[in-house]
Amino acid sequence: MKNSSPVWKSLKLGLIVLIGLVIYAYGFQVTQVSLDEISSPRRQESLTRVLRALAHPDILAYDKKEFAVNTPVYVPCPAGSVSLPEPDTSGPYMVMTPSCAEPRSDVHVEGFNFEPTTTGRVYFIPPSEVTLNMGEFQTDTEGHFAIDAKIPPRPAEEIQNIRAITQQNIGSPHLTQTAYDTWNKIIETVFLALLATTFGIMLAIPISFFAARNLMKDVTSTLSSLALSLIGWPAGIWLGAQFAGRVGEFSATLTTGPWVDLASILVSAVIVYLMLRWALPQEEQQAPGLGTRAARLLVLFLAALVSVLLLFLLTKLGVTVGDSLELHLGSFSFLGSFVFSLSDILNLLITTLVALATGGLVSAIAGRLGKMVFIRLSGQPAARLAVNMLLGALAGAALFVLVGAGINWFYEINDPQKIYYIPGLVGALLGVLAALLTRNEDILPIGLVIYYITRTILNALRSIEALIMVIVFVVWVGIGPFAGVLALSLHTIAALSKLYSEQVESILAGPLEAIKATGATRLQTIIYAVIPQIIPPYISFTMYRWDINVRMSTIIGFAGGGGIGFLLIQNINLLNYRAASAQMLAIAVVVAMMDMLSSYMRERVV
């Protein structure tokens, strides 16, 4: 039998169908698909109740006025005939059958001329005026109701009462407290998403260039330059942190007023500007001498010192001004709080920024030194190999010791041999091995290494949902929208960096090659050849991400990340479905408005 015969094709088709049925049958078992619960009266009643509650969002309400209607009753029946006053039929009234009854006996209560389609309760009122619930009722369109109830065991010789209590709407409808709470939380949600998107793009844009293969594949380095750069990073970061710490301590000892701080900031800014103009001239008639270069380096160091001091003075002034504005602006006190928060954030970031800048500077200088060594030893293969082995060993040891310290922070090994000595030795051996395996003329593709490392980190961050991230940030900063901002910012960085980098990879190569042919630096190439091509899609991706963050911010509230999701999950847990319906309606409206806004922005800008 040939495989192409109709019989064989039919058998294969039947086998495929059978396998598919088996797979779906097992899927039904795993997911517990069953219609038994659907037909359950209890489930249907619960579903009806929930759907009706969701269809009546708690947004508008009336002021209520309570109305009570009494009808007399004997419990038990008195001796002889029973004489009760006739009800006033011009308004709401009730009739009980029979007109008197024994304790614990059943009676039939009917009401007439009540408010149509309203609910209420029937109570038994003994002489002590204690209200005893007998049941609830729902009037029809004609204001009539009828219920069967049981007389409570409260016998008395005098006349007692059965009272029907209803509530009627008065005045015009007004917004409920749920509506006000929903409005406050939906505004919080929108701005939560806005801040997360803003913070995310601030880091996603520079990271996207490191994650673009077409920009990083041409970045190469010699082993000596790479090794010295790796050594320079931790050394520079440590020096920068120490430098910023000393300047910060000095600025804290300056007891000055806000006006003096402002004057100091202005004078310092002018001084820094003049220093930079002299130390970094745009044009020079001849090459500067050794003394001039040394003087310029000294001036640059002094400019950096004054700049860091200026930043600390700026944060000090911002805190003072923020406090003053918060006290005197009244309803606009949030502006003072904003100035205070920005100053506080800057104060926390100064040391980190200075450390990173110093690390980058030291790494760049060390890398240039390594390149000079590579060039100087071009005719001496043995000496170059020896230098590469030494530098490779030092760089490998430093890198592995840092990794060991990071692992120790997570797992608290606290064993110097396992943290420093063994990793340092392994790193040194790998550095020597890299030098031996690298030919003297080889150029290492460090750009691709950075590209793969960046992509791996972004993929790892993107695989963790913001709902999981917010749990960590809630522990760090507490329950509230700030934790949601941090979680969404981190997820936004990972997502936008991927989208941005893929857009960079798809740009036209012509402008890039043309700018490179002019001898432009890498930074100039990015500014003049890359950025003009990526601005429209970057704006489109940013608007789309803001739309996503608005929707995600409703979910992270479930884990304490603030926003309307925090209120929504509370009402769901409390089975307050009318309030939950109001929040879901607000979410739907905001998402629809965000979609229209993003479409409008893309149409106008992109």
Image: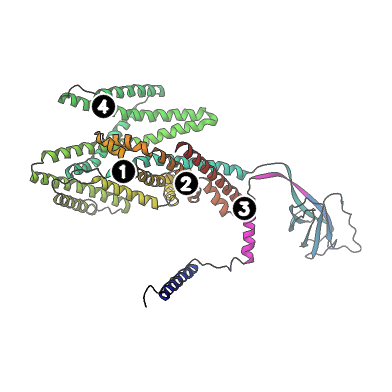
- Identify the residue position indicated by label 4 in the image: 302
Badges 3 and 4: C-beta atoms under 8 Å apart?
no
For numbered disc 3, what is the local secondary structure? helix
Structural distance between the alpha carbons of marks 2 and 3: 25 Å
Q: Quadrant of residue 139?
A: bottom right
Say which amino acid is labelled 4: Leu
Amino acid type, callout 1: Phe
Front one among 171 and 141: 141
Q: What element carries label 4?
A: helix
Q: Mark 3 to mark 1: distance in Å?
A: 49 Å
Q: Which of marks 4 and 2 is nearer the N terminus?
A: 4
Spot occupied by residue 194 in the image (x, y as percentages of width and height): 47, 40
- Residue 251: x and y in percent read 33, 29
The residue range painted magenta reads: 40-67
Is disc 3 in contact with disc 1, using a CB cutoff of under 8 Å? no
Query: Which is more foreground, mark 1 or mark 4?
Result: 1
- Residue type at the position of mark 3: Leu
| Residue 50, magenta (yes or no) | yes
Residue indicated by mark 1: 210
Q: Does the magenta stretch include residue 108?
A: no
* Earlier sequence position, callout 1 versus callout 4: 1
| Numbered mark located on residue 54 in the image | 3
The residue mark sitting in front, 4 or 2, is 2
Foreground tag (3 vs 1): 1
CA–CA distance in space, label 1 to label 4? 32 Å
Q: Is residue 454 visible?
A: yes
Amino acid type indicated by mark 2: Ile
> Marks 1 and 2, how far apart in space?
24 Å
Judged from this view, the residue extending furthest toward the right is 81
Residue drawn where x is 51% and y is 45% of the image: 563
